[in-house]
Image (tube, rainbow, N blue to C red):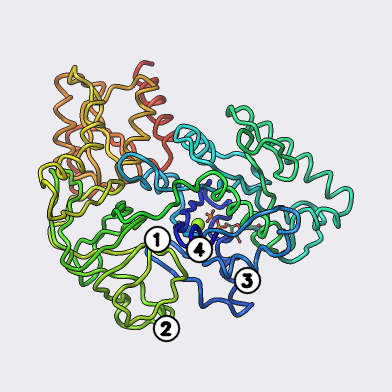
Amino acid sequence: SLTNLARLRSPILCVLGHVDTGKTKLLDKVRKTNVQEGEAGGITQQIGATFFPMTNLRKLTDQVSHSVKVDYKIPGLLVIDTPGHESFSNLRSRGTSICDICVLVVDIMHGLEPQTIESLQLLKRRRCPFLVALNKIDRCYDWQPNKDSPIQDTLAKQKSHTVREFESRWQGIKGEIASQGLNADLYYENKNPRKVVSVVPTSAITGEGVPDLLLLGIQLTQKMLVDRLMLSEALEATVLEVKVTEGFGTTLDIILVHGELHEGDTIVVCGMQGPIVTTIRTLLTPHPMKELRVKNEYVHHKSIEASMAVALPPVTSSLQAAMGVKIAASGLEGAVAGTSLLRLEKEDDIEELKSSVMEDLEELKKDVDKSGKGVHVQASTLGALEALLDFLHNSSIPVASINIGPVHKKDVIRASAMLERAPDLAMILAFDVKIVPEAEALAKKAGIKIFTANIIYHLFDQFKSFMEEKKA
Ligand code: GDP
Ligand code: MG
């Protein structure tokens, strides 16, 4: 009914996968098809995300909606374009993922790659519903393109040797997915979508299969998540990134899942050195005409609400609908990405909020080895650190200390405490973070090995071969 329709928020969809599988290109394709059809207006670029209103999605999925039955109940989709699984681990609020569904992109020519496997395992652990986009089908030999058409139509038009190549590549990938402990089927052959992962063959170049992918995404969120999508008044927001923004100092990029935020609100967020309590100075969204290189890149807002309807941006309106928002406030240095943002209300006990925002980090600190012997571990965000600690735990590598953010001198000093206690473990495992030059120099001088990688497996491999070398 219409009342239900008004009460569902936009689902949050996250795109994951190995580098170069076509994540960005797939999103570009959806945006571009709209631009070509003169529908760009409804699509809004947000902080770290893109909002696709249902009116646009409906046009794009028209051709497949006769074969896949779906009621359009949600107001649109918020798609998080930040690639890599680190961003997925970040999309959490109070311990649970704010990501409603994921699309895992696999290159049909390459099969499962390390980051794909890592994402698969993460999705499994978090029990996040997801689809697989089997991308770059147009690279099968002698492919006959059918621009923006549904996948079954285009497969029917291919020559038999092309279909055979497609089939054999798909069967191989299906086997690889099975060896990760998951069953997968092409979506139109999938009889048990609750247990078996649906796979949608796509091409981000020709747009083939893209309508299917969007429609399936809509269908999946609506089927599985109606309860989750009910709008509530309560504020739910999560910190996606902490970064310096020119003219604003250290800012928070957040995803606003539910509720409203106002200039002057007192907010509480997790900080590496303890809870941070501050006042929102300004709420910012990207300037809608950014491509014109306007001088001020951001639009200021007095208040912002989580978008539940089409977010056509009337710049002068005081209540802007958006889900990706940048917050400027003082004292945000040391804030931890991947944690909840809370607001202090009149009736709240501030001490309670403070301990609540610190909970996830405190939980991680418990994983640190009690013996006091172990490596120093550092990652970009809470989610990334959590994934890494999980992995080290399973690999029986002891951890003595942790930190979030770039590796500084003080981190090297901390790691060098191990030179006396357990010299073999006097090292830093750094995941997806920068090493500042002074830290690098000090580490060299002190004999602290620093391993860096953007993929957890690589870090582990480096560590293992280093240990073996030492033994030999
Ligand atoms: P990302 O790292 O996953 O975001 O990958 P990109 O979207 O940047 O794509 C990586 C490369 O693959 C680019 O050169 C794209 O043009 C190309 N690419 C992406 N999707 C497709 C596709 O469906 N077919 C073909 N032939 N090339 C693609
Ligand atoms: Mg990309």
The residue carrying pointer 2 sits among few (fewer than 14), some (14 to 19) or many (20 or more) residues within 10 Å by Cα, namely: few
State left or right for residue 322 relative to residue 363. Answer: right
- How many other residues sit within 10 Å of disc 4, few (<14), some (14-19) or many (≥20)? many
Could you tell which of marks 3 and 1 lies nearer the N-terminus?
A: 3
Residue 144 at x, y percent in the picture: 81, 60
Q: Give left or right: position of 385 versus 275.
A: right
Q: Tell me the distance, in whole angstroms, between the alpha carbons under discs 1 and 4.
A: 19 Å
Amino acid at dot 3: Thr
Identify the residue under disc 1. 48
Instruction: Tell me which label, 4 or 3, sits earlier in the chain.
Output: 3
Q: Residue at x 70, y 64 (%)?
A: 206
Query: Does the beta carbon of the residue at mark 3 sit less than 8 Å from ligand 1?
Result: no
Query: Which residue is labeled 4 in the image?
Result: 75
Examine the rendered structure and indicate whether residue 231 appears above or below residue 31: above
Residue 299 in percent (x, y) is at 31, 76
Kind of residue indicated by mark 2: Leu
Question: Does mark 2 have its CB less than 8 Å from ligand 2?
Answer: no
How far apart marks 4 and 2 lie (CA) works out to 29 Å
All told, the count of numbered labels is: 4
Which circle marks residue 33 in the picture? 3
| Foreground of the two, 361 or 190 | 190
Given residues 240 and 159, the one toward you in this image is 240
